[in-house]
């Protein structure tokens, strides 16, 4: 079960020059796809005098959720190689925009592909890549007599205790790594001799 993914921690920039053209690669992490239009707009505003701003992004752990744009460059010459740089680094929840200042010499499709890939890849190489876990929240309710056993389990499995809402019974809200959810539920069931309520 896939329960983690790689993304970048901070935004980064890189710059390369090829045959008088300047390529500025910028990588951005986002939490929601809704942030993407504002990111593209801010880059176009920052480099308002540049000729093109091709970009690519991938969202979530579903490999089908991606998009790329050549932004006026020849079809297939720019957005796709930027996406290839993202995929080479196995990243998601990231957008890379490569701004080009045209230097007066045509690079051809092959030259453009290499330049856009290199600029995108370099900006990602400058980034700190982090692993994010996919988790599930569960609520467990049990008698106080089992509190020590449950707390030991939480500690040994490095489970995140989000909230303790205990009243007459112990009631804990836990955040568990997806691949461990069933295992932890079974452990809690066994520790409480089947008396736990799991929600």
Image (tube, helix red, strand yellow):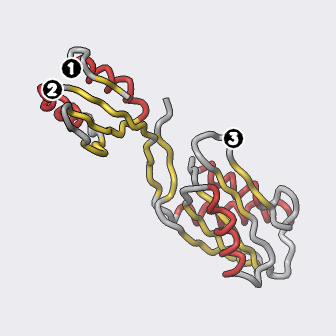
Q: Where is residue 37 in the image (x, y as percent from the top left)?
A: 69, 65
Give the labeled residue for mark 1: 192
Q: Farthest residue toward the front?
A: 168
Q: Of discs 1 and 3, which sits in the foreground?
A: 1
The alpha-carbon separation of the residues under discs 3 and 2 comes to 45 Å
Q: Are marks 1 and 3 in contact (CB under 8 Å)?
A: no
| For the residues bearing labels 2 and 1, Cβ distance under 8 angstroms | yes
> Counting residues from the N terminus, which is met first, the one under dot 3 or under dot 2?
3
* Element carrying mark 2: helix
Whether tag 3 and tag 2 are in contact, CB under 8 A, the answer is no
Relative image position of residue 98 (x, y in whole percent): 69, 68
Front-most of residues 19 and 122: 122
Residue picked out by circle 3: 64
Toward which corner of the image does residue 157 lie, by quadrant?
top left
Q: In this view, does 176 lie above or below 80?
A: above
Q: In which quarter of the image is residue 165?
A: top left
Residue drawn 69% across and 54% down? 83
35 with respect to 100 (left or right) = left
């Amino acid at each position: 079960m896939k329960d983690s993914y790689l993304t970048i921690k901070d935004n980064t920039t890189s710059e390369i020059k090829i045959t008088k053209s300047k390529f500025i690669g910028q990588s951005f992490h986002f939490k929601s796809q809704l942030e993407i239009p504002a990111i593209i707009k801010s880059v176009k505003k920052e480099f308002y005098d540049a000729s093109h701003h091709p970009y690519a992004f991938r969202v979530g752990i579903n490999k089908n959720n991606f998009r790329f744009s050549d932004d006026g460059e020849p079809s297939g010459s720019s957005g796709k190689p930027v996406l290839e740089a993202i995929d080479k680094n196995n990243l998601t929840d990231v957008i890379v925009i490569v701004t080009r200042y045209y230097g007066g010499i045509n690079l051809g499709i092959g030259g453009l592909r290499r330049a856009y890939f290199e600029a995108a890849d370099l900006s990602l190489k400058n980034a700190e890549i982090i692993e994010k876990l996919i988790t599930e929240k569960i609520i467990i309710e049990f008698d106080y007599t089992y509190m020590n056993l449950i707390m030991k389990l939480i500690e040994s499995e490095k489970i995140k205790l989000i909230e303790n809402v205990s009243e007459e019974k112990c009631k804990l809200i836990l955040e568990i790594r997806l691949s461990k959810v069933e295992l932890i539920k079974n452990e809690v069931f066994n520790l409480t001799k089947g008396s736990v309520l799991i929600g």
